[in-house]
Amino acid sequence: MVTMKELYFSDVPEKLSCARRLNERHGPDLLTLPGMREKLHNLEVLSQALQRQMAGMAMFALCKACAEKVGGGCCSAYMANETDALLLLLNMLLGVEVASQRDDSFECCYLGPQGCTLRVKPIFCLNYNCHHILTGNTSAVVKNLEKAASAVLLDQTAVEKILLRHILSR
Ligand code: SF4
Ligand code: SF4
């Protein structure tokens, strides 16, 4: 039986190992739960819509510029602690090869050369309330970004609840 500490409160590498174990043990069952494939597909669609919205706002270039400055951007090593084993498991079920991309104490280990390698991210990573983004866009565009991010977050939270219920019942 997995513990809440392993799922949510252990170190970043331990949470990744926990997610891998859960995926091996429960992945096939989880994928065949009623409606699960549709739910994952829906989450994928919403996540792609968010990516398109971000690309349309040139956010990848903005964040890259921040990351190249002294002090770095938002994807710090500290932020990697916001991931949990359930979120990593959900990424695995979505087909992401979740793996540490780096071994330094500066940047989040899931930050790859093209940006974040996770399909669904921790809630704090979806909070784009910074002045670079807010000042460079109209309020309508920022609203669209918030809507797209909330839609992903609502959906991923709902799927995570199903995963957790299933895992704890075994
Ligand atoms: S979200 Fe804003 S502050 Fe954070 S890296 Fe991107 S542009 Fe910079
Ligand atoms: S967006 Fe991705 S790379 Fe950046 S801190 Fe969050 S999980 Fe890490």
Image (cartoon, helix red, strand yellow):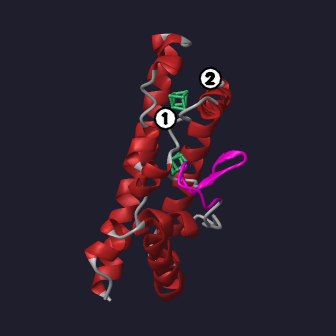
On the rendered image, what quadrant is the N terminus found in?
A: bottom left
The region drawn magenta spans 102-117
Residue 163 in the image: above or below residue 69: below
Q: Is residue 160 left or right of residue 40?
A: left
Confirm whether the magenta stretch covers residue 18.
no
Residue at 32% in and 83% down: 2
The answer to which of marks 2 and 1 sits earlier in the sequence is 2
Is label 2 or label 1 in front? 2
> Observer-nearest residue: 110 or 40?
110
What amino acid is found at the position of numbered circle 2 in the picture? Answer: Met
Please tell me whether mark 2 sits on a helix, a strand or a loop: loop
Q: Quadrant of residue 157?
A: bottom left
Residue 19 % position (x, y): 47, 75
Residue at 42% in and 26% down: 129
Residue 43 % position (x, y): 52, 53
Please tell me whether mark 1 sits on a helix, a strand or a loop: helix
Residue at 56% in and 49% down: 107
> Observer-nearest residue: 94 or 38?
94
What amino acid is found at the position of numbered circle 1 in the picture? Answer: Ala
> Observer-nearest residue: 34 or 8?
8
Residue at 54% in and 63% down: 91
Residue 46 in the image: above or below residue 44: above
Q: Quadrant of residue 73?
A: top right
Cα distance, mark 2 to mark 1?
13 Å
Residue 75 % position (x, y): 53, 43
Q: Is residue 115 left or right of residue 162?
A: right
Q: Quadrant of residue 52?
A: top right
Circle 2/circle 1 CB separation < 8 Å:
no
Q: Which residue is mark 2?
A: 57
Q: Which residue is mark 1?
A: 148
